[in-house]
Amino acid sequence: MAKLKITLVKSTIGRKKDHIATVNALGLKKIGNSVVHEDTPQVKGMINKVSYLLTVEEI
């Protein structure tokens, strides 16, 4: 299964609470932080919800 490298590039300040919770659930805390997750439908849905805050690379 493919892996995705997800990086937070914009701040969560002033965003909707559910968007902030989604970013936190992905494991991202500060701008510039990156995490690696498996490419699953659940993770894809989370990325889709807050895509304007993230960059995603396939590993």
Image (cartoon, rainbow, N blue to C red):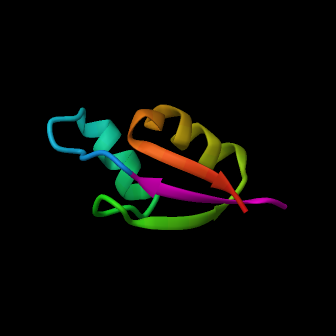
For image coordinates 34% across by 38% down, the residue present is 19
Q: Return the residue nearer the eye: 11 or 39.
A: 11
What span is colored magenta in the figure?
1-8
Secondary structure, magenta segment, majority class: strand
**Above or below 58: residue 12:** above
Q: Return the residue nearer the eye: 29 or 22.
A: 29
**Quadrant of the image occupied by residue 41:** top right
| Residue 40 screen position, x and y as percent | 72, 51
**Quadrant of the image occupied by residue 47:** top right
Question: In the rendered view, does 15 fall on the left or right side of 28?
Answer: left
- In this figure, what is the number of numbered marks? 0
| Residue 1 screen position, x and y as percent | 84, 61
| Residue 46 screen position, x and y as percent | 52, 42
For image coordinates 64% across by 53% down, the residue present is 57
| Residue 59 screen position, x and y as percent | 73, 63
Question: In the rendered view, does 50 fall on the left or right side of 41?
Answer: left
